[in-house]
Amino acid sequence: MSQEAISDLIRVKIDRGDLPSSWPDKTWGSVSENAGTTCAACGLPIPEGFGLVEVEFSGSDLRTFHPACAHLVAAICGAP
């Protein structure tokens, strides 16, 4: 999937309320330990052993992203 297509999908998810419209302060990187983990932005799987970004929205709303998708979400949400 192209970056443009992922960006469009992220905007749709934000408009529908499926993703928050602001980027939080709490994020961390990790490695996927589960082959069933999916990216909250593009919906594609994050393979076991690959890097991922975890983001905590609103205290208990934890989302997982591919690093490239997290970067696009942050750019769209206006992260500092």
Image (cartoon, rainbow, N blue to C red):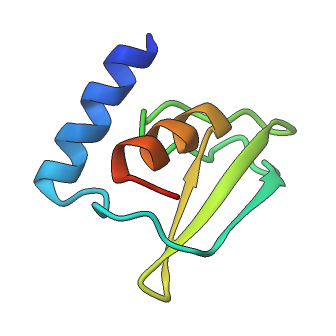
Where in the figure is residue 35, as x and y percent of width and height?
72, 41
Taking the image as shown, residue 8 lies to the left or right of residue 78, namely left
Q: Residue placed at 36% from the left, 52% from the top?
A: 77
Q: Residue placed at 43% from the left, 36% from the top?
A: 43
In the picture, the quarter occupied by the N terminus is top left
Q: Residue furthest top?
A: 2
Q: Residue placed at 62% from the left, 47% from the top?
A: 37
Q: How many marks?
A: 0
Q: Residue furthest bottom?
A: 59
Quadrant of residue 51 within the rendered picture: top right
Q: Residue placed at 12% from the left, 53% from the top?
A: 16
Where in the figure is residue 62, as x and y percent of width and height?
53, 71
Q: Is residue 12 above or below residue 20?
A: above
Q: Please indicate, yes or no, whether residue 68 appears anywhere in the rendered image.
A: yes
Where in the figure is residue 23, as x and y percent of width and height?
44, 63
Near-viewer residue (36 or 62)? 62
Q: Please indicate, yes or no, whether residue 40 appears anywhere in the rendered image.
A: no
Where in the figure is residue 66, as x and y percent of width and height?
62, 38
Q: Residue furthest left?
A: 16
Q: Is residue 35 above or below residue 79?
A: above
Q: Is residue 70 above or below residue 24?
A: above
Near-viewer residue (58 or 32)? 58
